[in-house]
Image: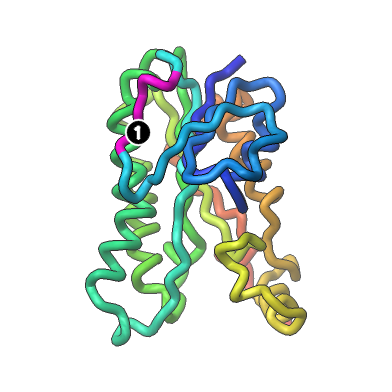
Amino acid sequence: MKNILLIGGSYGIGLAIAKELQQGNNVFVASRTNEELTNLNVTHIPFDASTDILDVSKLPAVIDGLIYCPGSINLRPFKALKIDAFETDLQINFIGAVKVIQSLLPNLTASNQSSIVLFSSVAASMGMPFHTSVAAAKGAIEGFAKALAAEYAPKIRVNVIAPSLTDTPLADKFLNNDEKKEKSSLRHPLKRFGTTDDIAQMANFLISDKSSWISGQIFHVDGGMSTLLVNG
């Protein structure tokens, strides 16, 4: 049974991952709230990735998997963005992950082979208007993950999931009526936007031994958006 730490698993993609991993793993969820976790077979640790230092004393000495979920969707014209917006996006998406990984490094290296899963965005590889702040933060994650994977191979595997728009509370303003949902679906070659289960299943695969020969990769779970042209 693997010891898995999920940062930010109280709603959206994180909650879907917690549900996916709870069977057959010893799952710890570090998040601000736990209302949605009460019926799951997980251990909750109060934690705010933007302000708190992770208390590793509440965790097992060996951690086999780490998934960092906190993120942001801050879409505004570049000229309207103040430097604070870039710093905030970088903090929650990237710096928060760095702090968690550094504090957890002894636990991760104590495993025979641990796995780290981070989250980017389709916006990091595609030039998309109004995405300058979030694309910069997610781009930092992708470069960091590859360097970290190289430095700690073969002891720690590091991979990144880069979704397109996914139906989560964070994305609600982009999918809160039928017209928006239809427009978003049509932008993707597979003609639908993402679900939390789409992402959770990939995270489960990357944290498991089934992906034991995979590291330093960016997985575009995006309905084909980043590589395929939309017909018509």
Q: Where is residue 96 in the image (x, y as percent from the top left)?
A: 33, 46
Against 149, residue 172 (above or below) is: below
- In this rendering, the count of numbered labels is 1
Q: Is residue 203 left or right of residue 53?
A: right
- Residue occupying image coordinates x 66% and y 73%: 175
- Residue occupying image coordinates x 61% and y 62%: 169
Against 164, residue 196 (above or below) is: above
Q: Where is residue 228 in the image (x, y as percent from the top left)?
A: 63, 68
Question: Quadrant where the C terminus lies?
Answer: bottom right
- Residue occupying image coordinates x 76% and y 80%: 178
Q: What residue type is labelled 1?
A: Leu
| Residue 160 visible to the viewer | no
Which residue range is magenta in the image? Answer: 53-59
Closest to the observer, 52 or 19: 52
| Residue 129 visible to the viewer | yes
Closest to the observer, 228 or 98: 98
Residue count near mark 1 (Cα–Cα under 10 Å), binned few <14, some 14–19, many ≥20:
many
Closest to the observer, 228 or 149: 149
Q: Is residue 80 left or right of residue 69?
A: left
Q: In this view, does 40 lie to the left or right of 94?
A: right
Q: In this view, does 176 lie to the left or right of 4?
A: right
The residue pinned by badge 1 equals 54
Which image quarter: residue 47? Answer: top left
**Residue 148 among those drawn in magenta:** no
Question: Quadrant where the N terminus lies?
Answer: top right
Asked which secondary structure carries label 1, the reply is: loop
Which image quarter: residue 26? Answer: top right
Q: Where is residue 83 in the image (x, y as percent from the top left)?
A: 23, 72
User: Coloured how?
Assistant: rainbow
The residue lying furthest to the left in this view is 83
